Image (cartoon, coloured by chain):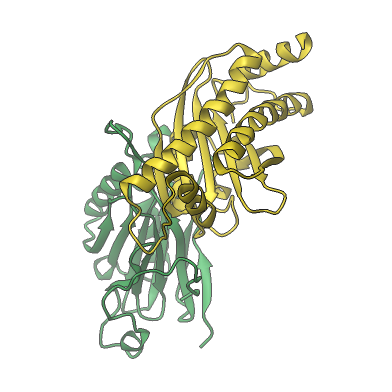
């Protein structure tokens, strides 16, 4: 099956039920990727949250997926439109790092931590539990969600690619073949890791 | 971007002038530091939507070293100096006399060496703007990060972005004649600081 990488840019939402699709958010710093999956349908969705609250938005044109508070309900709505059942949804949230550490002072404006807290709160408000949470810290993360089986893989500079969770049913046909079940390996920064 | 700021051709030329004057000073300092010629190769103004920031340097996953400062005084904003990782390692080696590679943890010594490179660039770049315009621009202590370009750039830009939808940046690319050392500097003035910066450069241009 041909893989098709769908990049979910800042403030965007993507939903897919094409088994070959891989929803991808590249190099998240303070941003948070929210992955959602309905295993009964093989339906996957992702939003790339940039800021915690839409209350500070100056522009009405900005899409709801940019903000945690309205982005999470928007993701749930869009998946329900395609037949998802809310109580079946499994989610993972990744990102929300504080990549820049200034010497000597604690930054009051840790947008990453605020984004992660706001996503968590919005998911709780939707009564959706979080199956895996990889937030905070100081490293950027790339996140990939395979539509075929709901596998979530995280890539960082130091750890390379690590399988974070499987949002689909583990006994599905493809989950076991995806590899990456071994322990995290060290990145070789001179080599470009491929798209998978 | 604030609707109050008119970004026509003339103001952009003025901003270009800011980039160029700062770049000349900064690249001279960098040449001395690296012991190689570094020439200012390219300065330009870019106005781009936030969504394009992660891909500013091409591949969002490209590993870069960034040294970031908050700028305060008459002009507020962010100043960012970035290098491809191989060039950052070469600079650190030139400064510390010790080879280092990414396979080892980036230690305190490497981090402070990079911070020092950033300090030198920031003080010459911002100092050149101060001298020309009479405005005060003070850099904060630096933040150093070695990570994916997208993560560093978006985290640096977001506090400036607030809730607007576009980013204005003054970008300088520099390199040696044999491309031994390349990097970029970005000055991101806040929306509120832009008119003051433009006025000062305009009057300096008239008097100069």
Residue under the image location 50 percent in, 27 percent down: B77
| Residue A151 image point, x, y percent | 34, 75
Chain depicted in green:
A
Taking B195 as reference, is B143 left or right?
A: left
Q: Nearer the viewer, residue B177 or A5?
A: B177
Taking B193 as reference, is A143 left or right?
A: left
Does the rendering let one see residue B167?
no
| Residue A163 image point, x, y percent | 31, 73
Which quadrant, please, contains the C terminus of chain B? Answer: top right
Does the rendering let one see residue B148?
yes
Residue under the image location 70 percent in, 30 percent down: B20
What is the quadrant of residue A118 in the picture? top left
Q: Nearer the viewer, residue B54 or B30?
A: B30
Reply above or below: B94 against B172.
below
Taking A190 as reference, is B39 left or right?
A: right
| Residue B98 image point, x, y percent | 41, 53
Chain depicted in yellow:
B
Residue under the image location 42 percent in, 65 percent down: A81
Looking at the image, the residue that sits furthest to the front is B97
């Amino acid at each position: 099956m041909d893989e098709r990488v769908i990049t979910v840019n800042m403030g965007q939402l993507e939903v897919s039920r094409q088994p070959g699709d891989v929803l991808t958010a590249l190099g998240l710093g303070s941003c948070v990727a929210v992955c959602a999956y309905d295993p009964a349908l093989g339906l996957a969705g992702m939003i790339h949250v940039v800021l915690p609250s839409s209350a500070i938005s100056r522009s009405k044109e900005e899409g709801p997926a940019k903000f945690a508070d309205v982005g999470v309900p928007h993701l749930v709505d869009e998946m329900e439109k395609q037949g998802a059942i809310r109580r079946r949804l499994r989610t993972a949230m990744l990102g929300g790092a504080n990549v820049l550490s200034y010497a000597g002072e604690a930054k009051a404006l840790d947008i990453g931590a605020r984004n992660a807290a706001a996503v968590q709160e919005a998911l709780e408000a939707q009564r959706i539990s979080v199956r895996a949470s990889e937030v905070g810290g100081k490293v950027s993360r790339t996140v990939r969600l395979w539509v075929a089986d709901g596998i979530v893989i995280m890539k960082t500079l130091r750890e390379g690619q690590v399988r974070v969770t499987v949002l689909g049913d583990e006994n599905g046909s493809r989950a076991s073949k995806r590899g990456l079940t071994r322990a995290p390996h060290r990145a070789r920064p001179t080599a470009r890791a491929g798209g998978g | 971007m604030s609707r109050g700021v008119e970004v026509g051709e003339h103001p952009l030329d003025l901003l270009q002038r800011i980039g160029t004057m700062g770049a000349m000073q900064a690249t001279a300092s960098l040449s001395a530091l690296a012991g190689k010629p570094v020439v200012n190769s390219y300065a330009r103004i870019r106005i781009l939507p936030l969504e394009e920031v992660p891909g500013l340097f091409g591949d969002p996953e490209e590993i870069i070293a960034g040294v970031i400062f908050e700028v305060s005084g008459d002009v507020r904003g962010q100043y960012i100096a970035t290098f491809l990782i191989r060039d950052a390692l070469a600079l650190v080696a030139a400064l510390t006399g010790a080879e280092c590679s990414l396979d080892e943890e980036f230690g305190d010594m490497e981090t402070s060496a990079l911070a020092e490179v950033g300090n030198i660039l920031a003080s010459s770049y911002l100092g050149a703007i101060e001298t020309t315009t009479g405005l005060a621009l003070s850099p904060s202590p630096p933040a150093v990060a070695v990570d994916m370009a997208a993560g560093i750039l978006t985290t640096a830009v977001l506090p400036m972005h607030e809730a607007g939808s576009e980013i204005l940046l003054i970008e300088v690319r520099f390199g040696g004649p044999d491309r031994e050392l390349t990097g970029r500097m970005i000055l991101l003035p806040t929306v509120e600081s832009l008119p003051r910066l433009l006025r000062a450069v305009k009057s300096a241009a008239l008097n100069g």
